[in-house]
Structures are given as structure tokens and as C-alpha cells.
Amino acid sequence: MASFLTIRKRVNYLIGESNYGTRAQNTIINDHILMAVQDIVRVHPYSWNIKTSTAGSLSTGSFALSADYLPQWHLEDARIVTSSSSDDDYIFTEISVKDRDQYTTSDYVYWLTYNTSTSVYNFNSLTQSGTVPYYYHFRPADMSSDSDECIVPDGEAVAYLAASKINALDPATKANSDKYLEEAMRRIENMYVSDLKFGINLKSSLDLIGVKNKDGYLFNSQKKS
């Protein structure tokens, strides 16, 4: 994993700056790096961007999901664990809210809603009570210190995407912006292909060829509408 400082140095190089400086001296660069990380985790549902919460406790059929839940992607798993045996858990299935009347409390289904008062997503179910551990894709916390490690396995993808966004601000560097965006997307797609093949272990596979759409990029079809 690349550190915040390593990525900042790389972005400085790509945009032709020699001042690596501190965070205060590189506010624009740092902000673009942080935005690039958030953009990347929204392109595909990566296995390295999943964590679990044991805080889900149904009260009258609802509980608030973790504040860092990333709504672009479905929950990976939600269940009531009944014993040490995995074959008798009550596993929840996501449904559309409009179909909820077709189910009963014994069906273990759920739907998500957004609470505008608390600014978090709610897990809703016909099942009224129970503890529901769940796995979800999350919004990475922003890096702040130079030594913080970037969650994205390929730090170059972050650097190229950040440099592309910075260069896009100036017509004189727009050509570089396009080239950097192309390289960033190539690396993002290769990370996803590698993730599908090997899980969280990013292999030396930056030349893997993914399935491409008409724009030349591989996108996952399970993104939530």
C-alpha cells in the first residue's frame, strides 16, 4: 500500500511540480488525492473495500446502518446468527420496498431507506427484532498524515486520477489530463479484474485485459440504481 506522502510526491511529479511540502502547502493536491480515492471505490464493488458491523439490532423492524456505508453497492451479507452452525442462520434477502406486502415476518427480507434527519441509511425488515451482523462497502476515511496508507492497492491509479483532475483545470494541460485519465482507468479496471481473480491480494497483473464496454472501460452491472 502506498502512503499519503508517496502518492502526493507522485502527483507532484505528474503535474510538473517539485515541491512535495506539507499538507498545508499542498491543499489542492491533497484534496484531489482524497477525492480520487472516493471516486475509485465507487467504480466497482471491490473485496478490499468491505467490512463488517455487528451493531445492527432490529428495533420495531429497523436499525441505522453504519454512517460510512457506501450506498452505491448492495449489502454483501446480512443475517441473524442462530448458532455456531452456518447452515441454520436466518439470511436476509434485499427486496424493493414496493414488494414488502408480499412477504411475512418469517421470510427475512429487507429494504433500505434514507433518513434525512440523521443522514444515514436505515435497514428495514418485517422481522421486528434480532441482532443482524452485516457486511458492507464503506467510504474510506480520509488520509491526513504523511504516513497514512491508502486503502487502494494500486497507489498509481490514485495518483494518475488526481493528476488528471488537476490538469483538467488548465486548458494548457488538458492533453495530459486525458492521458492520465486513460492510465488511471486502465489501472482501475485491472484492479477489479485482479480482485475478481485473486481477492484482496493484488497480483502483478497490471496488463490483464478486462471486458470493455463501448467507452473502453469495464463496469460492474450490479451497481444500484
Image (cartoon, helix red, strand yellow):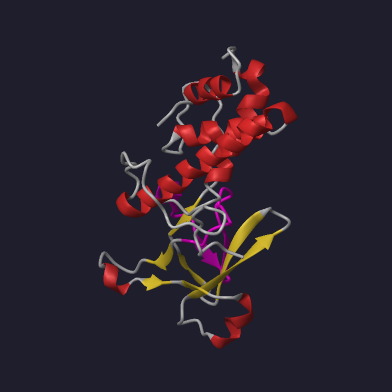
Q: Is residue 167 visible?
A: yes
Q: Is residue 207 left or right of residue 104?
A: left
Q: Is residue 170 visible?
A: no
Residue at 39% over, 73% down: 90
Q: Is residue 138 left or right of residue 2?
A: right
Where the N terminus falls, by quadrant? top left
Which stretch appears magenta? 47-75
Q: Is residue 44 above or below residue 184?
A: below
**Percent from the top left, x then y, of residue 110?**
53, 72
Residue placed furthest toward the left:
85
**Percent from the top left, x then y, of residue 43?**
54, 51
**Percent from the top left, x then y, of residue 136?**
48, 55
Residue 203 is drawn in which quadrant? top left
**Percent from the top left, x then y, of residue 192?**
42, 50
Count of marks overlaid on the render: 0
Residue 162 inside the magenta-drawn segment: no
Along the viewing direction, whichever of 41 and 137 lies nearer the viewer:
41
Residue at 65% over, 17% down: 24
Where the C terminus falls, by quadrant? bottom right
Along the viewing direction, whichever of 224 and 158 lies nearer the viewer:
158
Q: Is residue 91 above or below residue 44?
A: below
Q: Is residue 33 left or right of residue 154?
A: right
Residue 74 inside the magenta-drawn segment: yes
Residue at 30% over, 50% down: 198
